[in-house]
């Protein structure tokens, strides 16, 4: 196994782990807020579940980038490519947009979800507005996902 | 017990805020007769199971339930306890008065303080004060030395603020430090206005002044002697709020109105932290709004009596 391959795997690991941690935190605080509201108003469970789930998408995007990286370097095909150190760093760098933005945007989205859950508690009819406001944070995770995907598939010759 | 998180606590508070009496219900309560107002309160679920024909019992039950909920869901009881100290002070005063006059004061005690009401009564009767918050202990140990119940009562009120000062010295909270400093200032200004109305001397005023405010102590004596409240008392960090209230109260001359305006100014200060989901702000703001609601209901029913 070359140093290049180790770097590519490290990038994939971070792409899966960091957004996963961020999403877990975001969904956790969203769940706490929703539990607080549902303890007084059980009928709001359905509306709040969507808001709680929104910060979970970054974890999925990170997982996707990790899998794409593994596919691209041949780890899932049975024969891993002999990557140079430069290629390894390139894969590592390609994973970073999703890893870093995924972590931070999931935490931010979790906080936005908490605020939206609290707003929905006071005005149940505003849940759609809350979902829209919370989903806007997602934009930056999607941009990072696109950058990582393009770099992995187009930007790095193997 | 697992620590309650802020998102959970604030989520529950947001749902509970819907039970606050809204402006349209206030309007209906004001327009209604006493019996209708009691029925309206009962209809919206106010009273937490208290007899539906006794507004004072309903208000009291609701206050106790609010304090119980706050104590149960507070992520940082050290902060919310500061708002429950006046209940301890009330119980201490009632228990001491009962002991001194040889009366049964059980019905005067209120639940929802930082120390259970019965424990306060037993502590006072047995003269064993180790269960009371720190700042109350020296006051209780010297309780027999106070010449009048008024002076004892003033000392207990000062102990509340001393306890708050002790806690905020150990653990910083800019929102609450500012709030309690404002409360001390506002209460001292009100005490000075009241002292002037009752023609007290400066020494007597000094016994009721609270610690922890931002107005220099000498300003109160100066205001009392000169009778010029606006120029002498509009000092410290909350001078603009004090000026607003004093200038308005000079026009209508009502101490009750000034007290109510100072309460509004205090709540406005707390509202600065109301939208911070990860702080104690929304929780204490809800507690204050509930307490203000109870006070306003008492005034409303007193007027209808």
Image: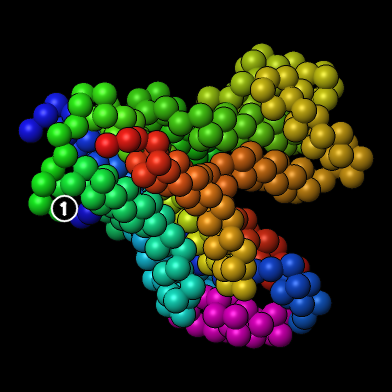
Of all chains, the one bearing label 1 is A
Q: Which residue position is annotated with label 1?
A: A76
Residue B179 position within the rendered picture, expressed as x and y whole percent measured from the top left: 57, 35
* Magenta stretch encompasses residue A142: no
Q: Would residue A108 appear left or right of A65 to someone viewing this image?
A: right
Tell me the residue at 83%/25% (across/down). B230
Residue B53 position within the rendered picture, expressed as x and y whole percent measured from the top left: 58, 84
Q: Quadrant of residue B36?
A: bottom right
Q: Nearer the viewer, residue B132 or B74?
A: B74
Residue A147 position within the rendered picture, expressed as x and y whole percent measured from the top left: 45, 41
Tell me the residue at 47%/49% (across/down). A142
Outermost residue toward the left?
A1
Asked if residue A29 is positioned above or below residue A81 in the image, the reply reads below
- Which element is circle 1 on? loop
Tell me the residue at 59%/68% (across/down). A128
Q: Would residue A74 appear left or right of B132 to someone viewing this image?
A: left
Outermost residue toward the front?
A158
Asked if residue A2 is positioned above or below residue B64 in the image, the reply reads above
Q: Nearer the viewer, residue B2 or A33?
A: A33
Magenta region: which residues? B34-56
Question: In which quadrant of the rendered image does the N terminus of chain B lie?
Answer: bottom left
Q: Nearer the viewer, residue B179 or A147?
A: A147
């Amino acid at each position: 196994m070359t140093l290049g391959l180790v770097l590519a795997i490290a990038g994939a690991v971070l792409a899966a782990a960091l957004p996963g941690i961020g999403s877990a935190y975001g969904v956790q605080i969203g769940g706490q807020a929703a539990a607080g509201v549902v303890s007084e108003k059980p009928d709001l469970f359905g509306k709040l579940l969507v808001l709680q789930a929104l910060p979970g998408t970054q974890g999925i995007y990170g997982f996707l980038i990790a899998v794409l990286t593994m596919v691209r370097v041949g780890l899932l095909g049975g024969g891993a490519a002999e990557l140079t150190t430069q290629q390894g760093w390139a894969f590592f760098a390609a994973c970073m947009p999703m890893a870093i933005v995924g972590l931070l945007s999931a935490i931010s989205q979790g906080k936005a979800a908490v605020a939206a859950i609290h707003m929905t508690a006071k005005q149940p009819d505003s849940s759609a507005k809350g979902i829209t406001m919370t989903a806007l944070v997602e934009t930056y995770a999607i941009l990072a996902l696109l950058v990582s995907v393009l770099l992995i598939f187009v930007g790095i010759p193997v | 017990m697992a620590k309650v998180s802020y998102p959970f606590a604030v989520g529950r508070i947001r749902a509970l805020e819907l039970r606050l009496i809204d402006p349209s219900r206030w309007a209906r309560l004001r327009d209604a007769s006493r019996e209708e107002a009691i029925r309206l309160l009962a209809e919206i679920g106010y009273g937490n199971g208290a007899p539906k024909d006794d507004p004072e019992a309903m208000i009291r039950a609701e206050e106790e339930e609010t304090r119980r909920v706050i104590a149960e869901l507070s992520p940082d009881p050290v902060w919310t306890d500061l708002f429950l100290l006046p209940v301890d002070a009330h119980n201490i005063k009632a228990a001491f008065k009962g002991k001194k006059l040889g009366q049964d004061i059980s019905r005067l005690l209120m639940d929802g303080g930082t120390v259970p009401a019965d424990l306060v009564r037993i502590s006072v009767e047995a003269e064993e004060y180790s269960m009371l918050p720190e700042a109350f202990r020296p006051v209780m140990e010297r309780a027999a030395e106070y010449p009048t119940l008024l002076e004892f009562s003033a000392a207990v009120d000062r102990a509340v603020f001393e306890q708050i000062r002790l806690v905020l010295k150990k653990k910083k909270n800019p929102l609450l430090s500012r709030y309690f400093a404002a409360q001390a200032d506002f209460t001292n200004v009100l005490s000075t206005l009241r002292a002037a109305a009752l023609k007290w001397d400066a020494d007597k005023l000094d016994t009721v002044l609270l610690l922890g405010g931002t107005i220099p102590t000498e300003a109160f004596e100066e205001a009392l002697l000169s009778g010029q409240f606006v120029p002498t008392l509009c000092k410290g960090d909350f001078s603009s709020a004090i000026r607003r209230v004093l200038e308005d109260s000079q026009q209508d001359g009502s101490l009750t109105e000034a007290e109510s305006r100072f309460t509004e100014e205090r709540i406005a200060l707390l509202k600065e932290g109301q939208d911070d989901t990860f702080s104690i702000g929304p929780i204490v703001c809800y507690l204050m709004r509930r307490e203000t609601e109870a006070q306003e209901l008492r005034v409303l029913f007193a007027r209808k009596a």
